[in-house]
């Protein structure tokens, strides 16, 4: 029995979706979520932002 295209697309999706700061993230993740290229300066700025704001730092970019 073949799966329909709709069933195939949902089969590869995770059963539970995560958003924002629900999971651990790196400074590099924060830079990439902002749509910028990862550079040492941006990683350092992301580290400072994470120290100040915690998970709220990434939640401004991710739903």
Image: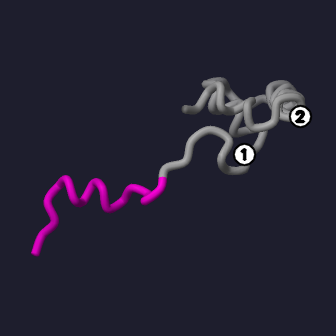
Query: Can you tell which mark lies on residue 25?
Result: 1
Residue at x 62%, y 38% (from the top left corner): 20
Q: Nearer the viewer, residue 21 or 42?
A: 21
Q: Position of residue 23 (x, y in %)?
A: 67, 50
Residue at x 67%, y 27% (from the top left corner): 37
Dot 1 falls on a residue whose secondary structure is loop
Residue at x 65%, y 25% (from the top left corner): 60
Rate crowding at label 2 as few (under 14), some (14 to 19) or many (20 or more) other CA atoms within 10 Å. few
Picture quarter containing residue 30?
top right
Picture quarter containing residue 63?
top right
Q: Position of residue 14 (x, y in %)?
A: 44, 58
Relative to 43, 33 lies left or right: left
Relative to 62, 53 lies left or right: right
Dot 2 falls on a residue whose secondary structure is helix
Magenta stretch holds residue 14: yes
Q: Along the polypeptide, which appears first: circle 2 or circle 1?
A: 1
The quadrant of the picture occupied by the N terminus is bottom left
Residue lying at the far left of the rendered structure: 1
> Circle 2 is placed at which residue position?
51
Magenta stretch holds residue 45: no
Picture quarter containing residue 34?
top right
Residue at x 65%, y 31% (from the top left corner): 59
First to last magenta residue range = 1-16
Q: Position of residue 21 (x, y in %)?
A: 68, 41
Q: Nearer the viewer, residue 57 or 32?
A: 57
Which colour style is shown?
one colour
């Amino acid at each position: 029995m073949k799966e329909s295209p709709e069933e195939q697309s949902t089969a590869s999706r995770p059963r539970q979706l995560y958003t924002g700061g629900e999971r651990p993230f790196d400074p590099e993740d924060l830079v990439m979520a902002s749509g910028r290229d990862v550079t040492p300066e941006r990683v350092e700025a992301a580290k400072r932002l994470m120290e100040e704001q915690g998970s709220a730092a990434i939640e401004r970019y991710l739903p």
